[in-house]
C-alpha cells in the first residue's frame, strides 16, 4: 500500500467485538477513524464513543474512495463468507482496504502481506511468509517460515502454523490449533479450536480436536 493511502482517514465496516479490537489498535496508532458502519448496537462498547456510527452499508458511498480507506471489522466463523463478500463488493466500487498491524506484532521484513490483512497483538510472522488479502492473524498466533496462506483466511488466537505449510482460500484455523510443517489445507476447510493437523486436509473438510470422555 502506498505511503499516501496509509495516512488516509479510515471507515470501519462492522461494530462487534472484532471491530472493537481493530479500533483499539488504530487508536493506539493515532489513526483517524471517521466512521463505523454497523447495523449492530455499539452503545455498550465504550471504545466506539466519539466515532460516528452509521447503520447502512450504502452510507459508505458518502465517503469518496479517493479520500478514505476501509477496514473490514466483521468477524468470521467456519464456512462463513460474509467478510469475503463485503470486501469484493467494495473493491468493485474502487475502495482500498487498509492493512492493520498491531504495534506489538512481529512481521518479518521478508514476509509479504497483501491488501486488507489484519495482524493482532503478539502475533509473529516469520521470513518467507506470504499472506493473501483480507486474512486475519489473531492475537498471539504464530505463522512460521515460508508459509503461504491464501486470501480470506482466519488464524485464531494462539494458533501455530509451522514452516512451509500452504492454505487455499477461505480457510478457518481455530484458537490453539496446531498445523505441523509441510501440511496443505484445502480451500474452505475448517480446523477447529485446539485441533492438531499432521496431514493434508481436503477442500471443505472440517477437523476437530480429539476429545476424551470425562466420568
Image: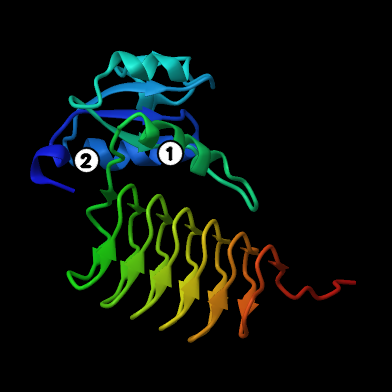
Looking at the image, which residue is at 26% across and 77% down?
127
The image position of residue 58, as x and y in percent, is 43, 16
Residue 87's tag is 1
Q: Which residue is mark 2?
A: 28
Q: Specify few, some or many for label 2: CA neighbours under 10 Å numbering under 14, 14-19, or 20 or more.
A: few
Q: Residue furthest front?
A: 92
Q: How is the image coloured?
A: rainbow
**Residue 156 to residue 98: above or below:** below
Give yes or no for contact between labels 2 and 1 (Cβ–Cβ under 8 Å): no
Q: Residues within 10 Å of mark 1 (few under 14, many from 20)?
A: many
User: In the rendered view of the protein, which quadrant contains the C terminus?
Assistant: bottom right
- Secondary structure beneath disc 1? helix
Instruction: Name the residue nearer the viewer: 63 or 154.
Output: 63
Q: Residue at x 27, y 52 (%)?
A: 101
On the image, the x and y values in percent for residue 109 come to 17, 69
- Which mark is drawn over residue 75? none
Which quadrant of the structure image shows residue 175? Answer: bottom right
Q: Position of residue 77 (x, y in %)?
A: 61, 48
Q: Nearer the viewer, residue 148 or 107?
A: 148
> SS of the residue at dot 2?
helix
Residue 66 position by quadrant: top left
1 sits to left or right of 165: left
Task: Specify which label sits upstream in the sequence, 2 or 1.
Answer: 2
**Residue displayed at 62% across by 69% down:** 194
In this rendering, position of residue 51 left or right of residue 176 = left
Frontmost residue, 112 versus 24:
112
Q: How many marks?
A: 2
- Is 166 drawn above or below residue 134 in the view shown? below
Kindly report which numbered mark, 2 or 1, lies closer to the viewer in this rendering. Answer: 1
Does residue 167 appear left or right of residue 124 in this picture? Answer: right
Amino acid at each position: 500500500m502506498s505511503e499516501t493511502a496509509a495516512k488516509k482517514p479510515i471507515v470501519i465496516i462492522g461494530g462487534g467485538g472484532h471491530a472493537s479490537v481493530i479500533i483499539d489498535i488504530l487508536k493506539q496508532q493515532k489513526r483517524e477513524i471517521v466512521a463505523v458502519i454497523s447495523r449492530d448496537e455499539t452503545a455498550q462498547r465504550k471504545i466506539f464513543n466519539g466515532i460516528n456510527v452509521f447503520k447502512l452499508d450504502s452510507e459508505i458511498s458518502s465517503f469518496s474512495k479517493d479520500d478514505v480507506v476501509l477496514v473490514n471489522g466483521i468477524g468470521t466463523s467456519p464456512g462463513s463468507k460474509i467478510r469475503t463478500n463485503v470486501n469484493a463488493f467494495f473493491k468493485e466500487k474502487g475502495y482500498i482496504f487498509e492493512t492493520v498491524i498491531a504495534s506489538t506484532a512481529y512481521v518479518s521484513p521478508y514476509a509479504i502481506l497483501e491488501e486488507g490483512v489484519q495482524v493482532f497483538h503478539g502475533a509473529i510472522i516469520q521470513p518467507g511468509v506470504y499472506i493473501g488479502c483480507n486474512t486475519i492473524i489473531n492475537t498471539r498466533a504464530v505463522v512460521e517460515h515460508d508459509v503461504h496462506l491464501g486470501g480470506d483466511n482466519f488464524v485464531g488466537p494462539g494458533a501455530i502454523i509451522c514452516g512451509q505449510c500452504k492454505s487455499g482460500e477461505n480457510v478457518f484455523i481455530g484458537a490453539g490449533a496446531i498445523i505441523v510443517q509441510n501440511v496443505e489445507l484445502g480451500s474452505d476447510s475448517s480446523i477447529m479450536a485446539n485441533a492438531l493437523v499432521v496431514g493434508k486436509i481436503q477442500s471443505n473438510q472440517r477437523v476437530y480436536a480429539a476429545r476424551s470422555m470425562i466420568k
